[in-house]
Amino acid sequence: MTGVKLDRLLTLEDPGRAADGAGGFVETWTALGTLWAQVVPRSGREAADGSVVRYRIVVRDSPPGSPARPLPQQRFSEGGRVFHIEAVTEAPGLDRHLLCYAYEETAA
């Protein structure tokens, strides 16, 4: 993997829960910061109410435990788009970069 071009500014977000006032909870998302990324589409499929597209997102590496290091169950956002992170690993052949495997759901 060569020629990484980090040309998209994504916001890394962490999930949380907040009381809904009726004894339950609603999902909330807290912005942890922004990361420059390369976003590459991998595959797509039709879903019941739209489509699901999978992406490989490359970002600069951060030390384990750093809030800037993406984790599964977190997400990236860009404007109105949301990329749910499924897995994160070191990028083979690219020092100091991480590969994030993510998906985006779109409504029909």
Image (tube, rainbow, N blue to C red):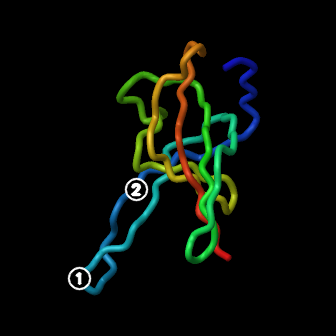
The alpha-carbon separation of the residues under discs 1 and 2 comes to: 19 Å
Please report whichever mark, 1 or 2, sits nearer to the chain's N-terminal start. Answer: 2
Using the image as rendered, state which of residue 42 and residue 82 is in the foreground.
Answer: 42
Residue name at image x 46 percent, y 34 percent: 88
Residue name at image x 61 percent, y 39 percent: 56
Residue name at image x 67 percent, y 53 percent: 78
88 left or right, relative to 92 = left
Q: Secondary structure at mark 1?
A: loop
Q: Amino acid at mark 1?
A: Gly
Q: Is residue 94 above or below residue 51?
A: above
Q: Amino acid at mark 2?
A: Pro
Q: Which residue is mark 2?
A: 15
Q: How many marks?
A: 2
Determine which quarter of the picture holds residue 36: top right
Where does residue 8 sit, x and y in percent of width and height? 73, 40
Task: Answer few, some or many: residues within 10 Å of disc 2's Cα (few below 14, many 20 plus, some between 14 and 19).
Answer: few
Task: Answer few, some or many: residues within 10 Å of disc 1's Cα (few below 14, many 20 plus, some between 14 and 19).
Answer: few
Q: Is residue 105 above or below residue 77?
A: below
Using the image as rendered, state which of residue 98 and residue 32 is in the foreground.
Answer: 98
Where does residue 108 sit, x and y in percent of width and height? 68, 76
Q: Is residue 52 above or below residue 66?
A: below
**Which residue is most to the left?**
23
Where does residue 63 sit, x and y in percent of width and height? 42, 22
Using the image as rendered, state which of residue 71 and residue 103 is in the foreground.
Answer: 103
Residue name at image x 41 percent, y 30 percent: 66
Q: Which residue is mark 1?
A: 23
Tell me if label 1 and label 2 are in contact, CB under 8 Å: no
Quarter of the image with the N terminus is top right
Determine which quarter of the picture holds residue 60: top right
Where does residue 19 sit, x and y in percent of width and height? 30, 74
